[in-house]
Amino acid sequence: MWMYHNIFLLFVLFITTMAEDLQEKFSQNNAKFSLNLYSQVKKDNADKNIIISPFSIQTCVALAYAGAGGKTAEEISSGLHLIGNDKNVVGESFKNVLDLYKDSPLLKIANKFYVKVGYQVKDEFNTIATKYFYSEAENIQFEEKVEAAAKMNNWVEERTNNKIKNLIKPDVLDSLTRMILINAIHFKGEWQHKFKESATQKENFWISETESVKVDMMNTKKNFRYGEFDDLDATALEMPYKNSNLSMLILLPRRKTGLSNLEEKLQGISLTNITQNMFFNEVIVKFPKFKTEFEIELTNTFEKMGMGSMFSDDADFSNLLDSPEPLKVSQIVHKAFIEVNEEGAEAAAATAAVIRMKRSAPISKHFTVDHPFLYAIISRDSQHKFIVFYGCIKSFIKNMTDSAKTCSDCRDEL
């Protein structure tokens, strides 16, 4: 009887394609994966503020895909909405985006994989990991749980400006752990139009039709891309970051309690395509400061998305290691952080797997974000459109002195 060994993976994703038709296809597929993923995550976190990096999660599993075969590879390719079944083509699509942001001062991406001492990865996998994902390799003794976890966590912390801590717990490591693939992503951008701190004031944020809490509400009046979407019963605003093609897209339900309805209507709609129906307009913006982090184990989520084989005894990762030992993924853990203030936003993420407007009239619009909303940090590069971070803010803690804190931050204080 085979003894199945653990593989533990942690990383992030950026996708594009080699030709224009494939680039557009990949952009659309990434949007599908992002919305499908968010839809599943919110089902089990109905009352929580959410921040995830679909790219981090997608890269995590895409790199595992490079070492997968058979049904396992087919499920991953379908579930992640990859551009095809050629692993080198898939890898090249990632490389194009990594190259795009290689020297970016705002968005930093790093990859690395650890292999147990005495084991070697197969040449094909090593080529894909190093050539397309720029991933470095290092041998490590997983049995030395505390030391090994500390070493890997330090690597993650250094590359996320210390925002993602303790992602890998010592107790998930043991003598059966063979490999850990890691990717970390960090974003820190200044608004192209900064909010004046002197204009920030306490205002109501409605968590229901009758309940509200006081939050630090930022205020400004500038030209932004703005859209009104009757089919979504929502409005949208795009706030760009300085010296980049990255921006924050905010989707605001017209009703105080309309977030769930908006989330449902967004199924099958690409967030990046929504921006094509938005136009520049002078907008009076009220937007709350917030900070939140979110952690989730994604095994159940991926099983519901049709990628259960990788966790089963039928898993096929025969293209990963030279050793004939059968492997399977035992966990997928994702952790993300975001802070938004007058200057801009900072966000980070890491994932661990153990292996659509009426054109606006030229008058000032009001965009008051005083109730639950969706947001995404997106790339609007002409050839590389994708979602970097995606989340929602549903509530803030009542009577707190620091309204930049969300309920997720304060859960342990309740």
Image (cartoon, grey):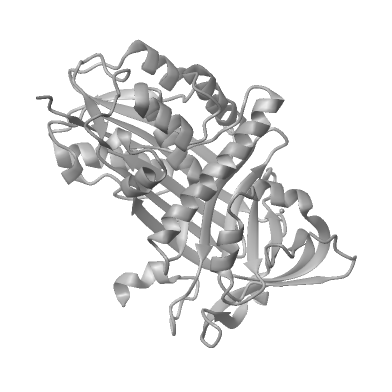
**Location of the N terminus (image quadrant):** top left
Residue 106 visible? The answer is no
Residue placed furthest toward the top: 123
Where does residue 199 sit, x and y in percent of width and height? 68, 76
Q: Position of residue 158 (x, y in %)?
A: 39, 42
Picture quarter containing residue 387? top right
Image point (27%, 18%), residue name: 321
Q: Does residue 414 appear to the left or right of 172 in the view shown?
A: right
Q: Quadrant of residue 354?
A: top left
Quick one: 96 or 64, which is closer to the camera? 64
Q: Residue at x 42, y 60 (%)?
A: 43
Occupied quadrant, residue 324: top left
- Disc tally is 0
Q: Residue at the left extreme?
A: 1
Q: Position of residue 31 (x, y in %)?
A: 58, 44
Left or right, 144 with respect to 405, comes to left
331 is higher (above) or lower (below) than 409 = above
Q: Is residue 344 above or below residue 126?
A: below
